[in-house]
Image: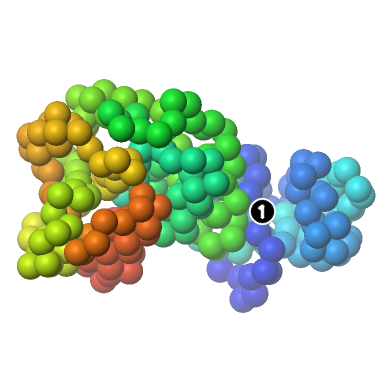
Amino acid sequence: MCAYTPPIRLFVDADLVKGATLSLDREQSHYLGHVMRRSAGDRLEIFNGRTDSFIAELTEISRKSASVQLVELCSDFKTSPDLWFLFAPVKRARLDFMAQKATELGVRHIQPVNTDYCQVSRVNQDRLSANAVEAAEQTGRLDVPSVGPFLPLHQILAEWPADRHLIFCDEALSADNQIDPLAQLHSKPIAKAGLLIGPEGGFSDTERDHIRQMSLVCPLSLGPRILRSDTAALAALSLFQAVWGDWSVSGLD
């Protein structure tokens, strides 16, 4: 690992090899030259989401293009905890927010699901991926969460891996002040997990029954108040990372 990490980080979908020269896209070039006011000779961190990151030096930059040379290794590659984030999409601005914050909070996979009371009928998967990349650049992680296609909840559950716990954030439990969410999470060791957040209207009775029949389901209370979907996501992901994720010494691999 290098002694100094530049404050600017950019993701590129390319193999990274010391000495290689990479061309940046127009948006990245504009960001470096006009937003961050960088010039030739300045340095930044380049990562590709799958291998070690590199310190790169700007070799040339113009209004529409820029190129960098990879000069030395920066950080050893490390994956985030094996945590999937499943959620019923909401309106566009809050959808962007959820993708960004899930990335910042260290999920490995983002999965929009279509539920009975879901507010939207389509999801722009490329937009979600772009939000994940931007958040990964900002937050310092070296991997970028994958983003799945918008799929029906019943299909997700039918194909659910047998060895992965499903953390079910159930608003029906929220009225019970006696339920301790930390105790719920501590009740059993969890090696792989998916965390499921419902839509604003909650889960239907049919969906709730289906979820509760899953073999490794773990219902989770999020306190005495009914939370908006984006708030519930932040609360649940923070709880999980504190118990089993990379906020914890006993967390997931």
Is residue 54 positioned above or below 148 on the image?
below
Quadrant of the rendering where the N terminus is positioned? bottom right
Q: Between residues 198 and 161, which one lies in front from this camera angle? A: 198
Q: Residue at coordinates 77% horizontally, 45% vertically from top-left?
A: 27
Q: Is residue 5 visible to us here? A: yes
Q: Which residue is mark 1?
A: 10
Q: Tell me where residue 154 sits by quadrant.
A: top left
Quadrant of the rendering where the C terminus is positioned? bottom left
Is residue 69 positioned above or below 202 on the image?
below
As drawn, is 127 to the left or to the right of 40?
Answer: left
- Horizontal and vertical percent for residue 79? 41, 53
Q: Between residues 157 and 69, which one lies in front from this camera angle? A: 157
- Horizontal and vertical percent for residue 9? 65, 59
Q: Residue at coordinates 44% horizontally, 31% vertically from top-left?
A: 120
- Horizontal and vertical percent for residue 177? 12, 67
Q: Identify the secondary structure beneath mark 1.
A: strand
Number of marks present in the image shown:
1
At label 1, the amino acid type is Leu
Q: Tell me where residue 40 sits by quadrant.
A: bottom right
As drawn, is 214 to the left or to the right of 114?
Answer: left
Q: Is residue 156 visible to us here? A: no
Q: Residues within 10 Å of mark 1 (few under 14, many from 20)?
A: some
